[in-house]
Amino acid sequence: MSDDKDQLFHTEMSDVVPLKNEPRAKPPGKGREQRDSSLEERRQAAVQGKQVDRNILTAEGIEPLDRWFVLEFKRPGVQNGVYRKLKQGRYEAEAQLDLHRMTAAVARKELFEFIEECYQYGLRSVQIIHGKGESKAEREGSSILKGCTDHWLRELAIVQAFHSAQPRHGGTGAVYVLLKKSEEKKRENREKFTKGRVPYDPV
């Protein structure tokens, strides 16, 4: 009886074809779709990284200056007496930046960040040392940095005036820089001025 059942079973199943194994479903986020998404994210991050750079200073094409050339610049509105005191080195430098031995690319970044930070901290009088090429090996690089400094400072609206330093402060290898008063400092001065004042009563 058992043999008959086995025979019947094999006869009934003789035309059955085994099912093909389907490929396993890929987990979400894997494969090419994920790679494409990751690539797009990296591209967006790169673009955003470039946009973060707010440095407006000219990067190329600046002419070097002679090491004895005197740098001088004053925006309209700066009082002559203030500029004269700056020129004479009568304002104490509240901060100093030394560009010696830097490449133009590094100096561009350092000068931009230095001036911006000084403004944010409310500093008004600062000094930048660009060098003047005392030795033959340094002469070319220093003169380029001097030309760059002269060009870059004019591009920054918060720079009100600048002039080559007195011999005791580096001469034509350095420059005094006068910065615009920050909004925070203006607010503090207004508060000091109005503190304790009695409002005018016309009655």
Image (tube, helix red, strand yellow):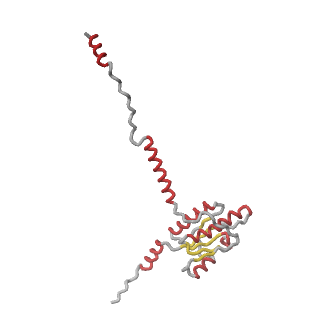
| Residue 192 % position (x, y) | 44, 77
Q: Residue at x 71, y 62 (%)?
A: 138
> What residue occupies the far right of the structure in this picture?
136
> What residue occupies the far front of the structure in this picture?
15
| Position above or below: 28 against 104 | above
Q: Residue at x 48, y 73 (%)?
A: 185
| Residue 68 % position (x, y) | 70, 72
Q: Residue at x 61, y 60 (%)?
A: 105
Describe residue 112's horizontal placement relative to residue 36 as left or right. right
The quarter of the rendered structure image containing the C terminus is: bottom left
The one nearer the camera, 12 or 136, is 12
> Which image quadrant for residue 198?
bottom left
> What residue occupies the far bottom of the structure in this picture?
203
| Residue 177 % position (x, y) | 59, 72
Describe residue 11's horizontal placement relative to residue 75 as left or right. left
| Residue 12 % position (x, y) | 29, 18
> Which image quadrant for residue 72?
bottom right
| Position above or below: 155 against 19 | below
The quarter of the rendered structure image containing the N terminus is: top left
The one nearer the camera, 100 or 14, is 14
> What residue occupies the far left of the structure in this picture?
1
Count every numbered label the image shows and give the total: 0
Describe residue 111's horizontal placement relative to residue 68 as left or right. left
Q: Residue at x 58, y 65 (%)?
A: 58
> Which image quadrant for residue 80?
bottom right
